[in-house]
Image (tube, rainbow, N blue to C red):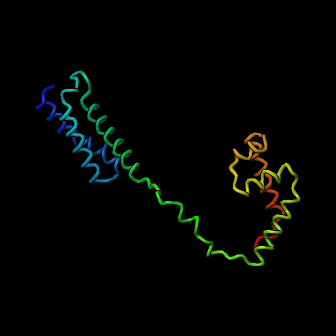
Amino acid sequence: MNTVTMEKELLSIRPGLYDYARQLTLCVEDAEDLVQETMYKVLKNAKMFVSENNFKGWAYTILKNIFINDYRKNAKRRQINDVTPNDYFLNLTNVYTQETPDMVLSVKEIDSVIAQFSDELRVPFKYYLNGYPYQEIADKLSIPLGTVKSRIFFARKKLQKLLKDYRE
């Protein structure tokens, strides 16, 4: 297919390309840009087109691929990476919550309830409360990861049940 024939064919399918671009982008301006970029790439890569192939299908495929590549590129841009140094938080005192006698009493009550648990539930739950990750707890206690997760789950449920009257 020569360049003149390709340009005529491309102009004849332009309304269909635009409709397809509108379905993909949901925006008039973005659809126009997408069609324009598609037409440019079709003409730029004209020598790659084999005349036995479906020209319309080839042009639609180029449009779709441009849309997908732009979508992926924009999705990466929307990611926000927090590069704030965490040193700030190390020296930050807890200004917002001050320990009151009621809070101390409640922590003591919760600890006394947890102390009543069987070792099977209490030990993994205490490790969890102290900030250990599940895998590390499993390694320390030499039990499977799933067992650690279930024991912590059951300890939470038991604690909720025993302290249900405690809620404000």
| The residue positioned farthest toward the bottom in the image shown | 101
Q: Camera-side residue: 168 or 115?
A: 115
Q: Is residue 16 above or below residue 6?
A: below
Q: In the image, what residue occupies the spot 86% across and 51% down? A: 119
Q: Position of residue 14 (x, y in %)?
A: 21, 41
Is residue 61 shown left or right of residue 8? right
Q: Is residue 117 above or below residue 163?
A: above
Where on the picture, by quarter, is residue 157? bottom right
Q: Position of residue 109 (x, y in %)?
A: 83, 68
Q: Camera-side residue: 66 or 61?
A: 66
Q: Position of residue 139 (x, y in %)?
A: 74, 42
Q: Quadrant of the C terminus?
A: bottom right
Q: In the image, what residue occupies the spot 24% across and 44% down? A: 35
Q: In the image, what residue occupies the spot 29% across and 51% down? A: 30
| The residue positioned farthest toward the left in the image shown | 4
Circle count:
0
Is residue 149 shown left or right of residue 6? right
Q: Position of residue 90 (x, y in %)?
A: 58, 64
Is residue 60 shown left or right of residue 141? left
Q: Is residue 24 above or below residue 159?
A: above
Q: In the image, what residue occupies the spot 33% across and 39% down? A: 64
Is residue 91 shown left or right of residue 52? right
Q: Quadrant of the N terminus?
A: top left
